[in-house]
Amino acid sequence: MEINKKMIRKILVVQVGGIGDVILTTPVFSVLKKHFPGAEVHFCTSALLKELISRLPNVDRVIIFPKPASKIFEVFMFYRILHKSHYDLIIDYQCTPGTALPIWFSRAPLRLGWKMQRRQWAYNIHSEANRLQKYVPLQKGQALKDIGINEINQKLEIALDDEWRTEVDKYFNAEKVDRNKLMVNMTPKGQVQTREWPPTKYVQLAELLVKKHGATVFFSGNLADREYLKQLASKSNCTIKVIPFWPLHLFAAYLSQVDLHFSYDNGPKHMAIAVDTPTLSLFATDPPLLWNPANDPNHPYLLSEVPCRFCRLIECPLMVCMKSIEPEEILQQIEKIPALQPKLLKR
């Protein structure tokens, strides 16, 4: 659809979802600013990521999506903000009932959303790019073709502050971490059972990294995971450090200073990519091509070769997919990552 770009003065991008979903949306901001240089670009998202998003140079304002939706006053104020902001263009990457209705109520002249039978009434521009078998940022960039933008960016972004890095430095100094040696972050505990690697294998991998490369290994997770992670770390013959539970902006600064993030596909993995830290991800139930940058040697993945892969289940009593991946196999993949070569001990 051809639109008069000079008439677009205010744009709203909507993506609530989880940490990863939000970060995977960030590449569109620079593209929108480039093609609508005189327009303000606002982002509607969850409060959790405000610190990391509001400082991005191509985001003029962050609007917090009301959660939980049962808070009637907050929902009413959100509707009022959208209606009175007079957006010329709204791009909704969420397309849930919670976002579709207020976007329709906003009366923005241009409303772009996914072509979904039950909710497409809320939008007057429809994209089917979410059905493409491509890395999610590429899907989101492809959707902009429906408003005449043919440029696609896949570089994830979050903003960091020097003060945050200094706070993390204090932790490393207090823990006497040798930063000349390999530093690896792992997130053993997941929110989806079918994405979890057996916890004892994280311990085995940590021991291999310490023994062969003198690495410092950290476990990270939610506040509720801390005791579990401490117990898991205590089972190791080597020292595994359980990091403090930091606010998300400090955790992002921490990820920017380690050498590798290893995990299943999760929000911290996408944060690590955004701060240019190498990652190694495990996949089984979901196709990696959607959630991992393609052909990037600093962000490899391991996919379990089992007949039931890509099952999309969230619970499974067998978990043969993850159980079949061994720590030695992970170590071999880590040793192939180009960005880590200066810190790998040659034997």
Image (cartoon, helix red, strand yellow):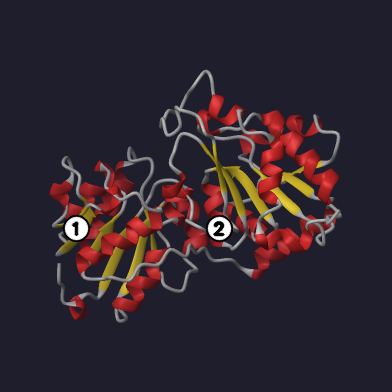
Q: Nearer the viewer, residue 321 or 2?
A: 321
- Answer whether residue 119 is visible to the viewer in this image: yes
Which labelled disc corresponds to residue 273? 2
Q: CA distance from mark 2 to mark 1?
A: 34 Å
Picture quarter with the N terminus = bottom left
Residue depicted at x 61% and y 40%: 222
Kindly indicate whether the residue at mark 1 contacts the one at mark 2 (C-beta within 8 angstroms). Answer: no
- Answer whether residue 88 is visible to the viewer in this image: no
Residue count near mark 2 (Cα–Cα under 10 Å), binned few <14, some 14–19, many ≥20: many
Count of numbered tags: 2
Name above or below for residue 305 compared with residue 156. Answer: above
Q: What amino acid is at disc 2? A: Ile
The picture places residue 204, in percent across and down from the top left corner, at: 76, 34
Quadrant of res 200:
top right
The picture places residue 315, in percent across and down from the top left corner, at: 47, 24
Residue depicted at x 36% and y 48%: 66
Quadrant of res 26:
bottom left
Residue depicted at x 46% and y 34%: 285
Q: Nearer the viewer, residue 66 or 268?
A: 268
The picture places residue 154, in percent across and down from the top left corner, at: 43, 63
Q: What amino acid is at disc 1? A: Ser
Q: Earlier in the sequence, mark 2 or mark 1?
A: 1
Residue depicted at x 60% and y 29%: 324
Which element type, helix, strand or loop, lies under badge 1?
helix
Residue count near mark 1 (Cα–Cα under 10 Å), binned few <14, some 14–19, many ≥20: many
Seen from this angle, which residue lies furthest top? 317
Name above or below for residue 12 compared with residue 48. Answer: below
Which element type, helix, strand or loop, lies under badge 2?
helix
Q: Is residue 271 left or right of residue 96?
A: right
Residue beneath disc 1: 106
